[in-house]
Image (cartoon, rainbow, N blue to C red):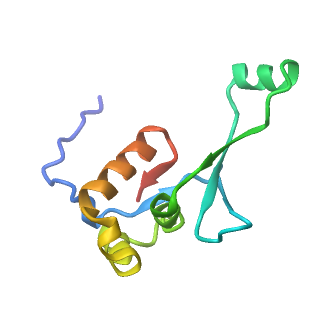
């Protein structure tokens, strides 16, 4: 019989490395290279049905603002959240303030929607 072990250590968000899931792609904006879209493939059976019979698009394109584009392009599983936060401060300055709460909320939202996972 397998028993689940309790984790005694706590996870620190700043040390975690966000990674965009492999089936999602990033498309840069042709007019403004600082902006991007995340391409979300439609994989569920109901979505495949709507693609086939209702002529819906194969992917959903989600346009991100400059801050979201900056962050999502750095979610490759290499940089920690702290490094991404530092990059935001260096690139956007006070425009990104308050950095950590905004970054944490953005990462929470994209994780809940299944766009990223942490390594």
From what the image shows, is residue 8 above or below residue 16? above
Looking at the image, residue 10 sits to the left or right of residue 86; the answer is left
Q: Which quarter of the picture shows residue 33?
A: bottom right
Looking at the image, residue 36 sits to the left or right of residue 86; the answer is right
Image point (55%, 53%), residue name: 64
Q: Which quarter of the picture shows residue 73?
A: bottom right
Image point (13%, 50%), residue name: 8
Q: Position of residue 52 (x, y in %)?
A: 86, 23
Looking at the image, residue 58 sits to the left or right of residue 14; the answer is right
**Name of the residue lying farthest toward the left:** 8
Q: Position of residue 37 (x, y in %)?
A: 63, 54
Image point (27%, 66%), residue name: 15
In the foreground, 79 or 28: 28
Task: State which quarter of the image contains the N terminus.
Answer: top left
Q: Position of residue 57 (x, y in %)?
A: 79, 34
In the foreground, 56 or 42: 56
């Amino acid at each position: 019989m397998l028993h689940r072990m309790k984790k005694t250590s706590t996870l620190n968000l700043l040390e975690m490395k966000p990674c965009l899931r492999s089936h999602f792609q990033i498309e840069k904006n042709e007019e403004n290279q600082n902006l991007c879209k995340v391409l979300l493939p439609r994989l569920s059976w109901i979505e495949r049905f709507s693609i086939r019979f209702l002529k819906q698009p194969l992917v959903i394109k989600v346009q991100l603002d400059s801050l979201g584009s900056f962050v999502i392009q750095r979610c490759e599983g290499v940089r920690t959240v702290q490094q991404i936060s530092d990059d935001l401060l260096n690139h956007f300055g006070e425009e990104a303030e308050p950095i950590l709460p905004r970054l944490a909320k953005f990462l929470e939202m994209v994780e809940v929607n299944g766009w990223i996972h942490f390594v």
